[in-house]
Image: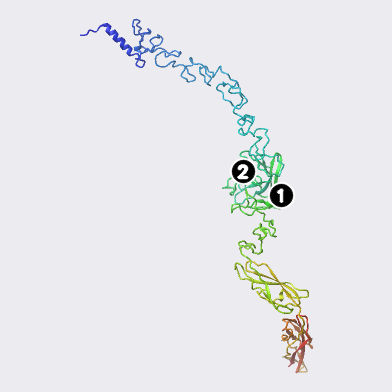
């Protein structure tokens, strides 16, 4: 049997105590329990009454043991694995203020209410240089002996706080000269590519002051044309109408290209402005439908102005723009009222008429192609001199005559048939039946005209047998040249007139024609007489009138001339009254009246009619007569 001795127990206690001093297994000591310090206990190394086995985390320092009050000294005085807990830590770095020192970090490290005290502050802004960042204020904010570094990006010598409007562009800073058409505000005045305006660089060439498709002023706009030859930015230009003004706001440069257009409107919404693409939306301006003005002003210079006067001199449009004639689109042209018209063509195929953003339509009051017709006068293509009302249809697929149909005109072909030696008084057969219609669009009709005759001729177009026939005849009356012109129509268009010349020679000899007045004629009539004084006398009325048909067609000409002229006259009429309906006809009608009656007897009135004929050479016959007897009996 082994006997446990006191020495053994002591050694065992030491081993147990050593095994418990590993830091994490130290037993907690109730701070309310009195600590009995046993100076005689060899396991309490610092004599603070707590052994390592009891949780003393530093058994070599009597000021460190579990349960004591923490001091601000950077040490874990109470063995709870925390140092200086319960003391202030203004910068939150887990170091108590009492132990912390001030760093240049923008924080109050030592908890004294000051930040970065003791560190340099070159610009006296209360922020130490070491933590201050450079701002554009003309000061050295970060104490690096440089001022506003990083705020002159483009190196033009002007920082952003010195009114450099574009610090990425070395050619843009206050006082720089404006560079033409570079799209940059070089002088930082808020305007881009502005010129020293003199007036006329921009032309107001179209104005919609009275829309009908949408309400005023939603559909109001105007168009500018750049006549300067260089791109123009119009930021900063003032629009004026009466007392109303609007200045074009700076932004993305509003540039009017050289020879180009820009549209400014009171409403940029295409859904409510009549489907107009507006480049810039202005405000505060409403255009009058009657009398008003519109102008552009820059730097005190009136660049352009247009005034309208309710139709007195300018057009008075209704649903169409005031349209400047594009052929006179130049400086001062829009000052002439006659250069304006009302637009007729809708820009989107419907609604109001005009041409916003593009070149203006040709004014309907101008004759642009020099064919003598304007659009208002029916010219359906005022850019082509071969197209106008009544023009010959010469071009396939083109409505040359503006009748609504593209057709080819018919072709007139004129000739004549006669002997090789055509003599005056010979019949001339004109031939137009060779005319034709290239597109067979209709039945041809013909029109002949005698357009020229030799001196001494009395012939006219009416002397043709039928001037509307395809092949009429004509008898020339004297020698010389006769010019005939033929046109044909297909019912839609008329041919070019075509002319032909027939040369007639004089006949070598001529016989005098012979007049034949026809056979004598007789007529009888009775009237009833009234008895007076029981038969002592009688009162008789005149016999009535009677018509005689004369016939001189038997007259002849030995030369077989195709025509002769007839001349009838009254040679003797006794006491009768005689009238003739046509003294130049071969077969006229003669009316005899006024033959008196005597009771119980017959009165005979003999009327003698004389006829002479003249052939086409001018030879005249001797007279031939015919007697017309009228027997009037009273009973």
User: Which residue is farthest left?
Assistant: 1
Q: Residues within 10 Å of mark 2 (few under 14, many from 20)?
A: some
Q: Where in the figure is residue 512, as x and y percent of width and height? A: 77, 84
- Say left or right for 229 vs 611: left
Q: Is residue 18 above or below residue 122?
A: above
The disc label shown at residue 108, or none: none
Q: Is residue 438 above or below residue 605?
A: above
Q: Which residue is mark 2?
A: 280
Q: Where in the figure is residue 38, as x and y percent of width and height? A: 34, 6
Q: Nearer the viewer, residue 80 or 599?
A: 80
Q: Which residue is mark 1?
A: 333
Per the image, label 2 sits on a secondary structure element best described as: strand
Quadrant of residue 245 in the image? top right
Q: Where in the figure is residue 30, as x and y percent of width and height? A: 36, 13
Q: Nearer the viewer, residue 297 or 450?
A: 450
Q: Are marks 2 and 1 in contact (CB under 8 Å)?
A: no
Note whether residue 312 is visible: no
- Say left or right for 29 vs 321: left
Per the image, label 1 sits on a secondary structure element best described as: helix
């Amino acid at each position: 049997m082994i006997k446990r001795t006191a020495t053994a127990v002591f050694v065992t206690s030491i081993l147990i105590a050593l095994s418990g001093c590993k830091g994490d297994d130290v037993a907690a000591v109730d701070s309310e329990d009195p600590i009995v310090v046993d100076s005689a206990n060899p396991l309490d190394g610092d004599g603070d009454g707590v052994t390592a086995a009891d949780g003393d985390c530093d058994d070599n320092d009597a000021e460190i043991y579990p349960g004591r009050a923490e001091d601000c000294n950077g040490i874990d005085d109470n063995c709870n694995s925390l140092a200086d807990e319960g003391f202030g830590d203004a910068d939150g770095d887990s170091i108590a203020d009492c132990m912390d020192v001030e760093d240049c970090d923008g924080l109050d490290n030592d908890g004294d209410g000051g930040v970065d005290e003791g560190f340099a502050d070159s610009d006296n802004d209360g922020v130490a240089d070491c933590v201050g960042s450079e701002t554009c204020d003309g000061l050295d904010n970060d104490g690096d002996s440089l001022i506003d570094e990083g705020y002159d990006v483009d190196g033009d010598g002007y920082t952003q706080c010195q009114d450099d409007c574009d610090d990425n562009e070395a050619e843009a800073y206050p006082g720089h000269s404006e560079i033409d058409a570079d799209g940059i505000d070089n002088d930082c005045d808020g305007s881009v590519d502005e010129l020293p305006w003199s007036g006329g660089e921009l032309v107001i060439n179209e104005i919609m002051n009275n829309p009908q498709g949408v309400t005023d002023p939603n559909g109001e706009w105007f168009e500018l044309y750049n006549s300067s030859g260089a791109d123009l930015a119009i930021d900063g230009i003032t629009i004026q109408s009466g007392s109303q003004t609007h200045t074009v706001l700076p932004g993305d440069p509003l540039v009017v290209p050289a020879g180009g257009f820009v549209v400014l409107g009171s409403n940029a919404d295409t859904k409510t402005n009549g489907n107009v693409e507006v480049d810039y939306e202005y405000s505060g301006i409403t255009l009058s439908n009657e009398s008003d003005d519109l102008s552009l002003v820059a730097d005190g210079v009136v660049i352009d102005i247009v005034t309208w006067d309710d139709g007195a001199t300018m057009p008075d449009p209704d649903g169409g723009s005031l349209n400047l004639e594009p052929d006179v689109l130049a400086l001062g042209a829009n000052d002439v009222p006659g250069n304006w018209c009302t637009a007729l063509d809708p820009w989107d195929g419907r609604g109001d008429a005009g041409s916003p953003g593009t070149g203006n339509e040709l004014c309907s009051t101008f004759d642009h192609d020099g064919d003598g017709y304007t659009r208002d006068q029916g010219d359906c293509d005022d850019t082509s001199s071969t197209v106008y009302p009544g023009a010959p249809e010469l071009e396939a697929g083109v409505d040359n005559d503006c009748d609504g149909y593209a057709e080819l005109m018919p072709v007139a072909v004129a000739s004549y048939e006669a002997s090789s030696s055509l003599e005056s008084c010979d019949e001339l057969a004109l031939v137009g039946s060779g005319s034709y219609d290239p597109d067979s669009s209709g039945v041809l009709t013909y029109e002949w005209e005698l357009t020229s005759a030799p001196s001494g001729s009395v012939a006219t177009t009416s002397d043709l047998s039928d001037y509307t026939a395809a092949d009429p005849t004509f008898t020339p009356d004297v020698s010389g040249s006769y010019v005939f012109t033929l046109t044909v129509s297909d019912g839609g268009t008329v041919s070019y007139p075509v002319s032909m010349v027939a040369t007639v020679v004089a006949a070598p000899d001529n016989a005098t024609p012979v007049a034949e007045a026809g056979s004598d004629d007789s007529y009888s009539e009775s009237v009833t007489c009234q008895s007076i004084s029981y038969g002592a006398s009688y009162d008789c009325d005149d016999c009535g009138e009677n018509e005689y048909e004369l016939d001189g067609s038997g007259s002849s000409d030995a030369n077989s001339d195709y025509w002769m002229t007839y001349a009838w006259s009254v040679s003797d009429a006794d006491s009768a009254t005689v009238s003739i309906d046509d003294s130049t006809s071969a077969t006229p009608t003669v009316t005899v009246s006024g033959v008196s009656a005597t009771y119980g007897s017959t009165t005979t009135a003999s009327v003698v009619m004389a006829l002479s004929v003249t052939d086409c050479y001018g030879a005249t016959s001797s007279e031939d007569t015919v007697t017309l007897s009228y027997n009037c009996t009273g009973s």
